Image (spheres, grey):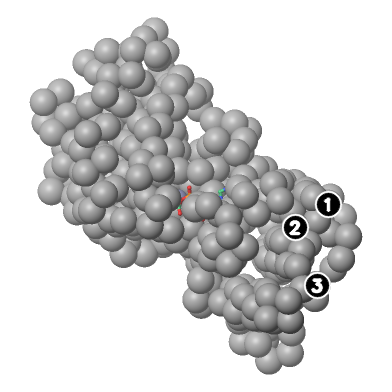
């Protein structure tokens, strides 16, 4: 037998029902059931539809995870669940399921922060996180720069988006370009065919007083509006819209700002390790530019494989296992589903 804790993690903050199982730092299984196709025709996630889908997927996904990992629920050392932030109804399904399991099995339960879990997942890919590490978290709901002295209990926010999250900007621009939801992966793919014409889109909060006041904050709504205006002007003049070039120039603007501020945050805080996580970390241009700029600045870069960047249960299990290994106490069984859980609160 192993001394490493066997932990099952449940994630239901948005439209993915994720169930992952880890043994210490080793990923045994990452089972994900997504309801994304049910939301596509609405152009965004519909909370009630997501909650219903979680209800239907929960038990089959837990059973699949256990079967594939050859693990019995009775053998688990701990359970972990996303307590927040996220969609209230969706979170409730995960939290209620985890509590039921914890009571039935007599197993300790850790309610964890979704954003800290996006950081913690990298441990199953690249080993223990250096302390402190810097984390650039970019997803559909969040864009944050985090200083992480200890992902199990000390996460500090250096800055975040003032308006749209990076993934939200990708999704909205994709819509303007007539691409399906969620748009991030489509923009990423299309942008590879573009770039022959460069459109100079704005980089929010990167110069003058804005940069002074919002050194590590982001703003993408001005960029999104600039793209929509540019496309509309083209359409009105009757000229064809070069959507691949627009996608490439938009993506370049987002990725430029994200990587520039992340490297600056590392330098100014004396941190040599940058972790990039969240759904947008699956973006190929972000991965390439982050690598280029980190190498130039002598910073070590850690980015999980794309499947572990988007929402999943392995990230929750990974954070739970690190909490067990560090001797953290389990959460109380009345732990909440907190849709607006602050990024600095790691455990509920
Ligand atoms: O972390 P995540 O799965 O869910 C949230 O917690 O929000 O992130 C989803 C977001 C969506 O906005 C999606 O368009 C974006 O991540 N995304 C991407 C890529 N893959 C997913 N954005 C840009 N390029 C990608 N390859
Ligand atoms: Zn997420």
Q: Which residue is mark 2?
A: 244
Residue 33 vs 258, above or below: the answer is: above
Q: Residue at x 32, y 44 (%)?
A: 12
Q: Position of residue 263 (x, y in %)?
A: 73, 62
- Res 71 quadrant in image: top left
Considering every residue shown, the one lying at the far front of the view is 238
Q: Residue at x 54, y 30 (%)?
A: 124
Tell me the distance, in whole angstroms, between the alpha carbons under discs 3 and 1: 22 Å
Nearer the observer, 75 or 41: 41
Residue 186 shown left or right of residue 8 in the figure: right
Mark 2 sits near ligand 1, with its Cβ under 8 Å away: no
Q: Position of residue 319 (x, y in %)?
A: 42, 39
- Of the numbered discs 3 and 2, the one sitting upstream in the chain is 3
Q: Which residue is mark 3?
A: 199
Please tell me whether mark 1 sits on a helix, a strand or a loop.
Answer: helix
Please tell me whether mark 3 sits on a helix, a strand or a loop.
Answer: loop
Dot 1, how many residues are within 10 Å of its Cα: few (below 14), some (14-19), or many (20+)? few
- Of the numbered discs 2 and 1, the one sitting upstream in the chain is 2
Tell me the distance, in whole angstroms, between the alpha carbons under discs 3 and 2: 11 Å
- Of the numbered discs 3 and 1, the one sitting upstream in the chain is 3
Q: Residue at x 26, y 40 (%)?
A: 53
Please tell me whether mark 2 sits on a helix, a strand or a loop.
Answer: helix
| Location of the N terminus (image quadrant) | top left
Q: Are marks 2 and 1 in contact (CB under 8 Å)?
A: no
Residue 76 shown left or right of residue 100 in the figure: right
Q: Which residue is mark 1?
A: 292
Q: Nearer the viewer, mark 3 or mark 1?
A: 3
Residue 252 in view, yes or no: no
């Amino acid at each position: 037998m192993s001394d490493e804790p066997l932990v099952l993690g449940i994630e239901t903050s948005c439209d993915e029902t994720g169930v992952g199982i880890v043994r210490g730092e080793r990923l045994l299984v990452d089972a994900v059931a997504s309801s994304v196709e049910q939301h596509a025709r609405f152009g965004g996630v519909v909370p009630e539809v997501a909650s219903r889908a979680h209800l239907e997927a929960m038990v089959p996904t837990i059973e699949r995870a256990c079967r594939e990992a050859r693990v019995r629920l009775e053998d688990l050392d701990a359970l972990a669940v996303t307590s927040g932030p996220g969609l209230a109804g969706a979170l409730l399904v995960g939290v209620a399921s985890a509590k039921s399991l914890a009571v039935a099995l007599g197993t300790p339960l850790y309610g964890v922060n979704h954003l800290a879990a996006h950081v913690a997942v990298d441990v199953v890919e690249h080993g223990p996180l250096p302390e402190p590490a810097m984390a650039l978290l970019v997803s559909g709901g969040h864009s944050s720069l985090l200083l992480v002295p200890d992902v199990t209990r000390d996460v500090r926010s250096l800055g975040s988006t003032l308006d749209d999250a990076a993934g939200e900007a990708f999704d909205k621009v994709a819509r303007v370009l007539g691409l399906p939801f969620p748009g991030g992966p489509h923009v990423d793919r299309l942008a590879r065919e573009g770039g022959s014409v460069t459109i100079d889109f704005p980089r929010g909060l990167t110069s003058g007083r804005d940069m002074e006041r919002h050194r590590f904050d982001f703003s993408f709504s001005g960029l999104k509006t600039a793209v929509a205006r540019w496309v509309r002007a083209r359409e009105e003049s009757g000229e064809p819209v070069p959507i691949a070039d627009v996608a490439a120039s938009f993506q370049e603007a987002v990725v430029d700002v994200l990587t520039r501020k992340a490297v600056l945050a590392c330098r100014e805080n004396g941190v040599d390790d940058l972790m990039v996580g969240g759904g947008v970390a699956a973006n190929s241009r972000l991965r390439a530019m982050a690598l280029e700029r980190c190498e130039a600045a002598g910073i070590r870069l850690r980015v999980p494989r794309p499947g572990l960047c988007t929402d999943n249960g392995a990230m929750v299990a990974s954070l739970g296992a690190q909490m067990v290994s560090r001797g953290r106490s389990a959460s109380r069984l009345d732990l909440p589903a907190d849709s607006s859980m602050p990024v600095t609160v790691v455990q509920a």
